[in-house]
Every structure is written in C-alpha cells, then in structure tokens.
Amino acid sequence: MESKWRILALLFTARCVMGMQFESVGALGPLLRAEGLDYAQLGILVGAYLAPSVLVALPGGIVVQRLGERTTLLLCAALMFAGALVDQSNEWNARLLARVIAGTGAVVFTIAGTKMIADMFIGRQFGLAMAALAGSWPCGIALALIALPPIADKFGLIGASVALVILTLMALILLFALPKQARQGAPLSAAFPSGAVTAAVVLAGLVAGTANATFANAFAFGPLLLTERGYTAEIAASHVSVALWTTIAAIPIGGALAIRRGSGIWIAAASLLLAAVGMAAVPLSDHDVLIFAGLGLVAGLSGATFASLPTWALPVQARAVGMGIYFTAFYGSMLALPPIAGVFAHRAGGAGIAFDVAAVALFVTLPLLGGFAALVSAPRSAPAVEEGAA
C-alpha cells in the first residue's frame, strides 16, 4: 500500500517536470517573439514536443510490454534530459530537435506511467490516482508559467533553459527509486486488443487528445494574447496560470467523478461543451482571469475522466499495447491543433483566433465521444478495470 503511493508520487513529480518542459515555449513565448520567432514558429515548437507521438506511441506500448515499466520510464526520463541539454542552443534547428527528443521520452513515459497506475489501483483509489497522474501535467504547466518568465527576465532565456536541464536531471535521478520489476512474460500476440476494443480506444484517444490539445493551446497562446493587450510577460503568464491552479484544486473532486463509466460519459460531454464556450469567450472579454479560472475548473473536474477513458475499454492483458494505440490517437490530436492555431494566428496577426480554433475543435469532438460511448456499452467490450473502478 505504501509502495504504490510512493510510486505515484515519483510519477507525479516526473510528469510535473514534463509539463514544465512542454509549456516552456508558451511561458517564454513573448521573449521568444522578441528574439524573432513568429506565431507560426511558436506553434511548431509547441507541436514538436508531441511530433514523435504518432510514430512512437504504439512501439512505446510494445516496449513497455517487453521491458517493463521501470526500465521504460528511466529511458524516457533520460530522453527528456537529453532534450533539455540540446535546447541550450538558441538556433532554430537545435530548438526543434530538442523538442522532438524530449517529446519522444514524454510520450512513452505517459504510456508506461498510465499503465502502471491502472495496474496498481482499483475502486475509489483508482479515480484518485488517475486524477493525480492527470493533474501532474497541468501542475507542471502552471509552474512553468509562474517560474520560467522571472528566471528568464533575470538570467535570460539561457537561464530558463539551464533550469530545465537541472529539473529533468532531478526527475531522472528520482525515478531510480522505482522498485525493480520482473520482465513482462505475456506473449505479445495476447497483448493486442480486439477490433471493437481498438476502435473504442482510438475514439477515446481522439476525444481526450482534442480536449487536452485545446487547453494546451490556451496555455501556449494565452500569454501572447494578454501581452497584445498591454500586459507584461510575467503578469500575462500569471493570469493564464490561474486556470492551472484552479484545475489542480478541482482534481480531487474530478477523481471521485471518474469512478463510474456511465456518469463519466456525461461529464466528458458537458466539459467539452463548457470548454468550447469558454474558449470562444477568451478573445471577446476583458475578464480573462475569471474565464481562465472557469476553464481550469472544467479541466480539473473532467481530467481524470478523460484519462480513464481507455481503461473502460481495455482488458488487463491488453493494457500496454492498448495504451500505445490510445496515445497514438491522443497525441495525433494534440500534435495537429497548435500548429493549425499558430498558422491562423500568424495570418490574422493576433493570438485571439487560436481560441476560436480550439472552440471549433471541441464542438467537432462531441460526435466522437458518442461513438466511444456506444462501443464501450456494447456487450462485446470487456470491462477494463476491476469492479468499482469502471
């Protein structure tokens, strides 16, 4: 009992650092703009962190199946550290390569960590643990928004880059405390889900990925929008970070809501609608703090539900590979949105339109959620988690 909560704490910490590394472009966006990067380039850098995802998510699930979670997590943390080292250069190609290297580790890390949590926790503990794991990402994003701009203001962009090197190295060292595991023994042929389950998992990935991408989009373009209104980079980042702190505060409630599959579908649908309205309101209103707080509340209440979607469809023996399939679709959605929003913002000459793109994407996702609900309700879909967790 004590060991699994310690493991959760280690995974939370490492994914928090991952969130900081991902959000570093959004948090430092105004300073990067001052160095000559345009909106489209910023969007590319945001998306580049997830660029390897479609290619490595399924192989990553197979790696987890063959090597086990601990070895995979250590290798992934090493890639995040290597990406932080490469990012010390201020050249465009180096920055792009750094994001790809670190993002490769981040993608497979999430697969291995999610499977580990799903295997260790059941019942109400499952909802709480999944909420904590899901909350580590926005926690890292929030920390990046409030910590990196002051560091860069005092020590320059290189100072913020060095801080990320130190943090990723600390995460790697901490993960050596994970307990050693026996290598996975199940044959790979038995680890692939059925066709119906695969379809449900793909839809779950598209839904959850789009939901997460729109929030990531807000955190990436929010500081830029507010600086266009006259805020300093630090104040703009702090206003946007309100969404993250609200998310974190709402996560425990979200974990309790994620326990049941039936009610979870309605929670997911409501969150997509409310988030779409909130995104559309951001560029139209001066009450940015209030709107970002509302978006954070929606994210916190629904985060564990979205993270739990694949477990409602996947049988235990297919979790490693199934998570790889899920995250292929998940990160495919996340990969597409930031560059698209960046191109629209570049053509419009302002960051506000990026929020309109996010709102449209959320509305389009609703029919996909309906398809997922139909598949997991069919008799041929096996329950994914133990009684009380699904």
Image (tube, helix red, strand yellow):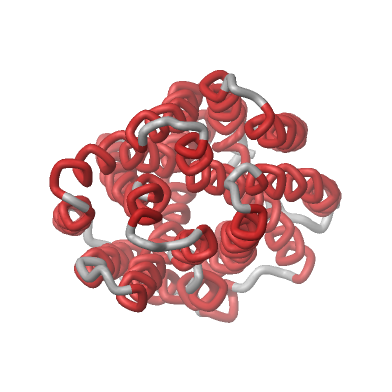
Q: Nearer the viewer, residue 277 or 300?
A: 277
Quadrant of the frame with the N terminus: top left
Quadrant of the frame with the C terminus: top right
Instruction: Give x and y (percent) for residue 8.
Output: 33, 42
Q: Is residue 254 visible?
A: no
Q: Nearer the viewer, residue 360 or 31?
A: 31
Query: Left or right of 316: which side holds 116?
Result: left
Instruction: Give x and y (percent) for residue 98.
Output: 32, 71
Identify which residue is drawn at 54% across, 67% down.
324
Query: Left or right of 79: which side holds 290?
Result: right
Instruction: Give x and y (percent) for residue 95.
Output: 33, 70
How many numbered marks are there? 0
Q: Is residue 288 above or below residue 359?
A: above
Instruction: Give x and y (percent) for residue 380.
Output: 81, 58
Identify which residue is drawn at 29% across, 74% down.
91
Query: Left or right of 176: which side holds 258?
Result: right
